[in-house]
Image (cartoon, helix red, strand yellow):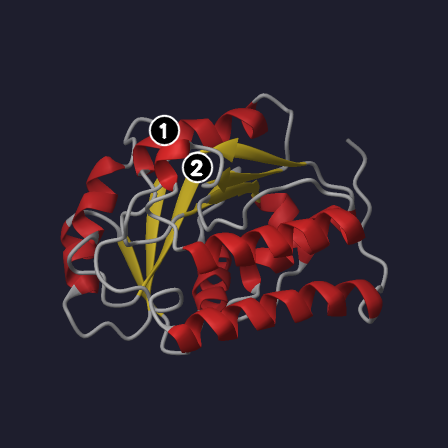
């Protein structure tokens, strides 16, 4: 299968080389680094290491991911991975296995299952994730424990979902729309470590509160007010 990896970045010069070096070269077809106005040389480092660098001048994590989806070169599966080296790119085969084996359409790297991950996840982030996961389970009947950024999906699934969130909500939008459309979502335990550098979201009180509130309201909004029919998938 053809595997494309999309890595959104913003000032990740300290870590992007490690992320790219750890990607399994034998299974990855292409690597797209979608950079949002970095001023520390992140795009130049990524380009030197062989990644295809796309400049996305519009702000937003979701916007970078959407730009990546729009520019991948005909893969079967698209993987999304942060550029801060908190997830381990070497664990990519764990995420791909359920899709390749025909057991899943979307896989999520769960950071709350592995005991060693607890020190790397701030308590407020753990609590927010658990609350969001509980709401998703109650409203959408999908049992998950984490909304982690390390994830994979078939390209045809991503296209069918018509994702549109440009900021924090992009990651949860994939889950909500995927559940409503009947796609199979499977969690996979992954390792998680303290990120290199400062988080743009969980590293600040404002960022944490803003992201948490946006995600929770998005879960409710999609359930109560955005129940337009989505393409149904038969497993």
Residue at the (17%, 49%) spot, across then down: 17
Q: Is residue 232 above or below residue 174?
A: above
Circle 1 residues within 10 Å: few <14, some 14–19, many ≥20: some
User: Outermost residue, front direction?
Assistant: 123
User: Which quarter of the rendered picture does the C terminus lie within?
Assistant: top right
The residue shown at (72%, 42%) is 142
Kindly identify which residue carries mark 2: 3
Q: Is residue 116 left or right of residue 231?
A: left
Percent across and percent down for residue 83 are 30, 54
Q: Nearer the viewer, residue 217 or 65?
A: 217
Q: Position of residue 167 (x, y in %)?
A: 51, 71
Q: Which residue is mark 1?
A: 27
User: How many other residues sit within 10 Å of disc 2, few (<14), some (14-19) or many (≥20)?
Assistant: many
Viewer-side residue, 6 vs 147: 147
Contact? badges 1 and 2 (CB < 8 Å): yes
* Picture layout, residue 230 above or below residue 85: below
Measure the alpha-carbon separation of dots 1 and 2: 7 Å
| x and y, in percent, of residue 68 in the image | 44, 58
- Residue 74 position, x and y percent, is 49, 44
The residue sitting at 39% across, 45% down in the picture is 5
The disc, 1 or 2, on the residue closer to the chain's N-terminal end is: 2
**Side of 195 where 100 appears, left or right:** right
């Amino acid at each position: 299968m053809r595997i494309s990896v999309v890595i959104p970045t913003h000032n990740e010069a300290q870590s992007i080389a490690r992320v790219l070096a750890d990607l399994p070269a034998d299974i990855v077809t292409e690597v797209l680094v979608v950079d949002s106005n970095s001023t520390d040389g992140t795009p130049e480092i990524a380009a030197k290491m062989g990644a295809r660098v796309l400049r996305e001048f519009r702000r937003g994590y979701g916007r970078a991911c959407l730009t990546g989806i729009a520019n991948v070169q005909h893969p079967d599966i698209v993987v999304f991975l942060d550029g801060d080296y908190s997830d381990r790119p070497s664990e990519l085969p764990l995420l791909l296995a359920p899709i390749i084996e025909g057991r899943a359409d979307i896989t999520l790297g769960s950071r709350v299952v592995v005991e060693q991950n607890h020190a790397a996840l701030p308590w407020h982030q753990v609590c927010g994730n658990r609350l969001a996961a509980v709401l998703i389970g109650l409203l959408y009947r999908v049992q998950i424990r984490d909304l982690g950024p390390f994830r994979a999906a078939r390209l045809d699934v991503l296209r069918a979902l018509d994702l549109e969130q440009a900021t924090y909500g992009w990651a949860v939008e994939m889950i909500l729309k995927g559940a409503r459309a009947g796609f199979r979502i499977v969690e996979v335990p992954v390792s998680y470590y303290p990120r290199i550098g400062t988080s743009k979201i969980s590293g600040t009180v404002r960022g944490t509160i803003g992201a948490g509130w946006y995600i929770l309201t998005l879960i409710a909004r999609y359930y109560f007010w955005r129940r337009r029919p989505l393409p149904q998938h038969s497993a």
